[in-house]
Amino acid sequence: MRKEYLRHRARVCLLVAAAVLASPAAVLAEPTAETIAVNVDQAKLVKLPGKVATIVVGNPLIADVTLQPGGMVVVTGKGYGATNFIALDRGGEVLVDRQIQVEGPSDRLVTVYRGVERESYSCMPICQRRVTLGDSDNYFNTTMGQAGALSNSAAGNAAGAAKTN
């Protein structure tokens, strides 16, 4: 009796699994050829029809799409998740409607937790600070402040060098 019950239960589980995998939602969850996969903080070039005049991004916090001459777009991963973009011609006709999937960083990322505080480091080949979405506010702001100060210093030095030449 127990053996028969277990076989019945196994058949039910298999049928449920098959139904879930065959459902339209399961098909939509899988990336397709129409899905553009890009890593967060990276960009990808995508060729579109030359008649594109307007780009609309579903969620600009996840991805940015910038139209370039000749029908090229630059897709930049801004945050984790999925969104879409729609390309329109001058008459408002939809030319392209594509999904964008933004995934985690591709480098060797080490995440350090100190209680609830989180810090991220890129370890290729040695570990250096890397600001990543989800890092603690203090770590994020300190690292961004240092990067901004370095950038401003470099821009100032470049401007000073240009004046002396």
Image (cartoon, rainbow, N blue to C red):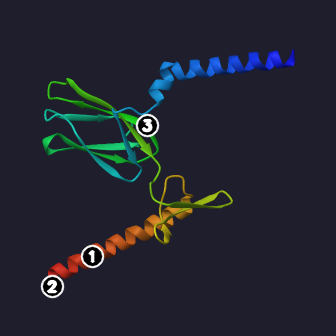
Q: Nearer the viewer, mark 3 or mark 2?
A: 3
Does residue 134 show up?
Answer: yes
Q: Residue at x 14, y 44 (%)?
A: 69
> Which of the 4 image quarters holds residue 33?
top left
Q: Would you identify the image quadrant in which residue 53 lies?
A: top left
**Can see residue 58?**
no
> Looking at the picture, does residue 108 appear above or below residue 34?
below
Residue pointed to by mark 3: 82
Image coordinates of residue 81 in percent, x first then y, are 46, 40
Secondary structure, mark 1, is: helix
Label 3's element?
A: strand
Q: Earlier in the sequence, mark 1 or mark 3?
A: 3
What residue type is disc 2 on?
A: Thr
The N terminus lies in which quarter of the figure?
Answer: top right
Q: Which residue is mark 2?
A: 164
At label 1, which amino acid type do we have? Gly
Q: Secondary structure at mark 2?
A: helix
**In the figure, residue 89 lies in which quadrant?**
top left
Q: Closest to the observer: 111 or 149?
A: 111
Q: For this view, does 112 lie left or right of residue 29?
A: right
Residue pictured at 86% horizontal, 18% vertical: 2
Which is more N-terminal, label 1 or label 2?
1
The residue pinned by badge 1 equals 156
The quarter in which the C terminus is drawn is bottom left
